[in-house]
Image (cartoon, rainbow, N blue to C red):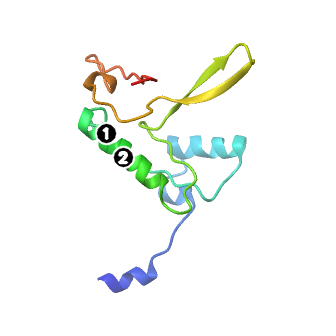
């Protein structure tokens, strides 16, 4: 089975992975119209009810930073590595600040009991 790996081909076309009528495909096409196309972007998605459980979230945090260390990777965004805009009135500028500056040990930081997600800036 391993010898078939020589026939492996990469596709950079989202349309080949999703039907053109799919809402994600439509949103991606709209995104490209606004911001242009960069063929060097990889989107990875997961579906898990555990994403905001403390242990799973911290593992996701670690993976985000491990991927960022791969040669050729310039940036990684994830739920564990998101930024928020902070307005600086005195300089009249907006800067980006990470929501999580390190892994959390507080189970409440990833999810409130009602399921509303919060992203504390300073842990």
The residue positioned farthest toward the right in the image shown: 92
Crowding near pointer 1: few (<14 within 10 Å), some, many (20+)? some
Distance, label 1 to label 2, CA atoms, is 6 Å
Residue pictured at 39% horizontal, 80% vertical: 5
- The percent position of residue 38, horizontal first and vertical second, equals 66, 54
Query: Which secondary structure lies at badge 2?
Result: helix
Residue placed under numbered mark 1 in the picture: 58
Query: Which secondary structure lies at badge 1?
Result: helix
Residue 87: quadrant of the picture? top right
Q: Nearer the viewer, residue 107 or 91?
A: 91
Determine contact: label 1, label 2, CB under 8 Å. yes
Crowding near pointer 2: few (<14 within 10 Å), some, many (20+)? some
Relative height, residue 46 to residue 49 (above, below): below
Residue pictured at 54% horizontal, 57% vertical: 73
Question: Which corner quadrant holds the C terminus?
Answer: top left
Q: Which mark is residue 62?
A: 2
- The percent position of residue 74, horizontal first and vertical second, equals 58, 53
Q: Nearer the viewer, residue 65 or 8?
A: 65
Relative height, residue 58 to residue 16 (above, below): above
């Amino acid at each position: 089975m391993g010898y078939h790996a020589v026939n492996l081909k990469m596709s950079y076309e989202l349309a080949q992975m999703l039907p053109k009528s799919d809402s994600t495909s439509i949103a991606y096409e709209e995104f490209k119209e606004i911001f242009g196309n960069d063929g060097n972007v990889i989107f990875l998605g997961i579906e898990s009810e555990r994403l905001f459980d403390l242990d799973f979230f911290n593992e996701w945090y670690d993976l985000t930073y491990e991927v960022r260390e791969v040669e050729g990777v310039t940036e990684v965004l994830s739920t564990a590595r998101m930024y928020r805009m902070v307005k600086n009135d005195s300089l009249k500028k907006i800067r980006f600040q990470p929501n999580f500056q390190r892994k959390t040990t507080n189970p409440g930081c990833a999810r409130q009991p009602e399921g509303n997600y919060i992203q504390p800036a300073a842990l």
